[in-house]
Image (cartoon, helix red, strand yellow):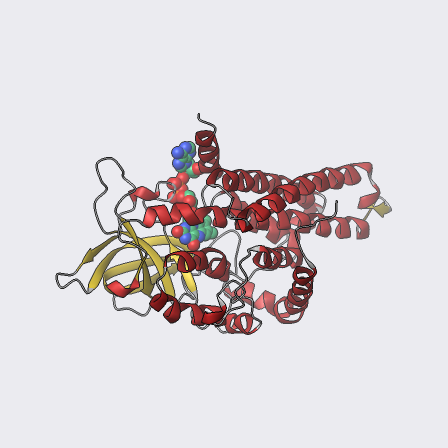
Amino acid sequence: MRRDIYTEDHEAFRETIRAFIESEIVPVYGQWLEAGIVPREFYKKVGELGVFGIEVPEEFGGAGVDSYKYEAVMTEEMARAGVSLGGSSVHIPLCLPYLLAQANDEQKQRWLPAMATGEAMFAIAMTEPGTGSDLAGMRTTAKLTEDGTHYVLNGSKTFITGGVNADRVIVCARTSAPSETDRRFGISLLVVDTTSKGYEVGRKLDKIGLRVSDTAELSFTDVLVPVEDLLGEENQGFYYLGQHLPRERLSIAVGAYAQGAAAIRFAKEYTQERQVFGKPVASFQNSKFELAACKAQVDAMEAVVDRALEAYDKGELTAADAASAKLFCTEAASDVIDRCLQLHGGYGYMNEYPIARLYADNRVNRIYGGTSEVMRSIIAKNMGL
Ligand SMILES: Cc1cc2nc3c(=O)[nH]c(=O)nc-3n(C[C@H](O)[C@H](O)[C@H](O)COP(=O)(O)OP(=O)(O)OC[C@H]3O[C@@H](n4cnc5c(N)ncnc54)[C@H](O)[C@@H]3O)c2cc1C
């Protein structure tokens, strides 16, 4: 089926990104994998290309495009090539919407231009060692000083994507106790300068996949955060998370779909080359049927993703829609990638083959941004169950 969500401009952008990946990322990707991180300086190159600034308003140095589709193209092209830009997967897709919607003009002036160029990288810290799915249970606190000029931040976060390279982190912290009727009340968002005294980056976590992504532990000991760095209104942070988590889930759905499509590409190429019993693996009926079944699943994912992208750009993507898209695409992509790995035989288990990395990278899609179980809960609640 012909995709009709992208225009000629999107396709021209796709060509630019594909060429950039081929010339700038593929040749050095092995080094990034070994180091377990994308070099900080590389993000300035991505900034120069204009990629980070696409959705940033023109007055703050961006292109002012009010659409998520260019980001989606970027995600698709990264997956197609079997590479990733590590921690920057949260910089624009997750963090920018908070700044666009909740930052005041003075804050936008301070943060957005550097965000667009890659001079300042952003991350977001919700999860804590003691709580992930149940975010209202977070224990990091931010108490206002007596003179009212600063918050004093104490606590710790874990699994923070981009946590090593980040210059600013949107930290979710309790500024008040939960109210009697609403345990979500009392959380605020602080845009914390990572060079602040008492701010520490702990371990860069050793993961089974997403190996170029710097996922880190963070800790805060009496970190003084100026009140000017409070994002939006005090105590309303949880509602802001609710406002922006659909986009995070959409971006994970797009990534999963693109990984599924990439897996088929890798498996098709591999099975056409690999000879077994004197003929290509692709010539067995089982291989054809497996790839055909995978293609049907990826077509279905594409339909879901495309509808969700259109809905998002129109401002109509609900929390339940996003949960549905994430649940379906991430579960289906896991199945597709597993079947495509199987067609590679033992080579599929070797890290030097992109399908092996895809298998490991994809697994987290069913966990982060809210687990599949949490997605089912959201959908069920929306069904009145
Ligand atoms: C690689 C990676 C990167 C990440 N990046 C970030 C980041 O940048 N920023 C950030 O803030 N967080 C990040 N996370 C955290 C991620 O969002 C959480 O891991 C996720 O939300 C799950 O929380 P948890 O790990 O505490 O699991 P838990 O909440 O402890 O869940 C454990 C199990 O219980 C199940 N469960 C929980 N609640 C229910 C329920 N109500 N009903 C049924 N089952 C339930 C879960 O589905 C899961 O199977 C990242 C995680 C990973 C692995």
Q: Is residue 244 above or below residue 112?
A: above
**Which of the image's four quarters has the N terminus?**
top right
Q: Position of residue 133 (x, y in %)?
A: 39, 41
Residue 162 visible from this viewpoint: yes
Q: Is residue 203 left or right of residue 7?
A: left
Q: Is residue 195 above or below residue 288?
A: below
Pick the front one: 3 or 325: 3
Q: Is residue 281 left or right of residue 190?
A: right
Residue 204 visible from this viewpoint: no
For the point 68% across and 57% down, the residue is: 7
Pick the front one: 189 or 18: 189
**Which of the image's four quarters has the C terminus?**
top left
Q: Position of residue 189 (x, y in %)?
A: 32, 55
For the point 54% across and 42% down, the residue is: 326
> In which quarter of the view is residue 198 placed?
bottom left
Q: Position of residue 338 (x, y in %)?
A: 64, 42
Pick the front one: 122 or 241: 241
